[in-house]
Image (tube, grey):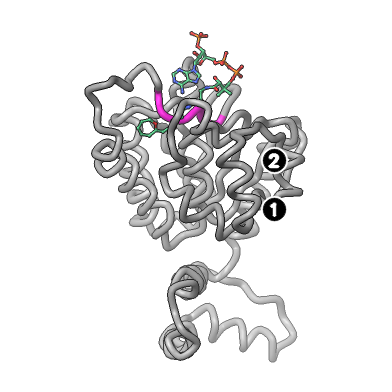
Amino acid sequence: MNSEVEYTVASSVATVTLARPERLNALTSTLLNELADSIEEANQDEAVRVIVLTGKGRGFCAGQDLKTVSPEMDHGDYLKSYYHPVVRALAGSKKPIIAAINGVAAGAGLSLTLACDFRIVQEDAKLSLGFINIGLVPDAGAPYFLPRLIGSAKALELALLGDTITGKQAVEFQLVTKAVAADRFEEEVMDFAQQLAARPTKVIAYIKQLQSASFESTLDDMLAQEIIYQSRAGKTEDHQRAVQAFLEKKPPVFTGR
Ligand SMILES: CC(C)(COP(=O)(O)OP(=O)(O)OC[C@H]1O[C@@H](n2cnc3c(N)ncnc32)[C@H](O)[C@@H]1OP(=O)(O)O)[C@@H](O)C(=O)NCCC(=O)NCCSC(=O)/C=C1/CC=CC=CO1
C-alpha cells in the first residue's frame, strides 16, 4: 500500500501521481521507493500501454524535500539508493511515459521528467533546475539527459544560471513536447495518452530500445541492432494485421501484441 504515490489504471493508461501536495510533492526516500515500484508495476501489467507521471495539487514536484537533508547525509549515497532506481525505471520503461507537468517542477522534480519520453506542461508552470541556487550539481539523470535533449549550450545555461522558465518558454528551449493552458491540461494529456495507447505497444518498446542505444553506438552497431528489432517487429501480430489492413484499404487497429 503506497502512502506518497497514488497509482490508478483506466483505459490502458496507468497514472502515477506524486502525492505530497502540502510540500509541492517534494521527494522523500519513501516517495522515491514507491515511485520506482509503481513504474515497475505499470511495466508488468499487460493492461497498461501508456504511463502518465504527474503531481497532486498545484505543482508537479519541488525536488528533494530539503527538510530531510542534513550535514550527516552523503548526497552521493542517497542518489544511488533512492534516485537512481527511479531514473533507471523511467528511462528503461518499455511503455511510453508522459510527464504531465501540472505546475512547478524544480530540482530533481524537473530532472525526473527528463527521463520520461514526453513532457506536457502547463503554459504558466515554472520550471527550474535550481540545484545551483542551493550549491549542488544537477542530478537524478539531468547531466545525462539534458544535453541530449536540448544541446550542450542550453543545458549549461539552465544548469549554471538556475533560472526559472515558464512552460511556454520551455517549448522554445525544446525541453517539452508541448505547453497547454491549465483549463485544458488534463484533457490534452489524456488525449495524447490515448493516441499513444492506440499504437503498437510492443513496437514502441523496440523503438525506445533502439533509440537509447544510438548515442553510445557506431553505425555498424546500430545496423546490427535494427536487424534484431525489425526482425522482432516483423513477427508481431500488430505488424502483420496492419499490413493486411493496408492491403484491404482499412485503418489499422493495434492491440499491442
Ligand atoms: C520554486 C518552488 C519549488 C515553488 O515556489 P512557490 O510556488 O512560491 O511555493 P513555496 O511557497 O516556495 O512552497 C510551498 C511550500 O512547499 C515547501 N517546499 C517547497 N519546496 C520544498 C522542498 N524542496 N523541500 C521542502 N519543502 C519545500 C515550502 O517551504 C512551502 O512550505 P510552507 O508553506 O510550509 O512554507 C520553491 O518552493 C523552491 O524553490 N523550492 C526549493 C527547490 C529546491 O531547491 N529543491 C531541491 C533541489 S535538490 C534536489 O532536488 C535533489 C537532491 C538529491 C540528493 C540529495 C540531496 C539534495 O538534493
Instruction: Report whether 136 appears left or right of 189.
Output: left
Provide the residue designation for mark 2. 187
- Circle 1: element type: loop
Quarter where residue 257 is shown: bottom left
One can see residue 227 in this view? yes
Cα separation, mark 1 vs mark 2, equals 22 Å
- Residue 246 placed where, x, y %? 69, 86
- Residue 232 placed where, x, y %? 42, 84
What span is in magenta?
Answer: 60-65
Q: Nearer the viewer, residue 194 or 134?
A: 134
> What main secondary structure does the magenta stretch of the protein show?
loop
Mark 2 neighbour density, 10 Å: few (under 14) some (14–19) many (20 or more): few
Residue 7 got which mark? none
Residue drawn at 42 percent across, 86 percent down: 221
Q: For residue 82: magenta?
A: no
Instruction: Report whether 89 appears left or right of 175.
Output: left
Disc 1 versus disc 2: nearer the observer = 1
One can see residue 12 in this view? no
Q: In this view, does 17 lie above or below 250?
A: above
Q: Is residue 79 above or below residue 215?
A: above
The amino acid pointed to by label 1 is: Gln
- Residue 28 placed where, x, y %? 34, 27
Q: Nearer the viewer, residue 183 or 138?
A: 138
Residue drawn at 65 percent across, 45 percent down: 120
The amino acid pointed to by label 2 is: Glu
Provide the residue designation for mark 1. 174
Q: Which of 81 and 47 is in front in this view?
A: 81
Residue drawn at 46 percent across, 30 percent down: 63
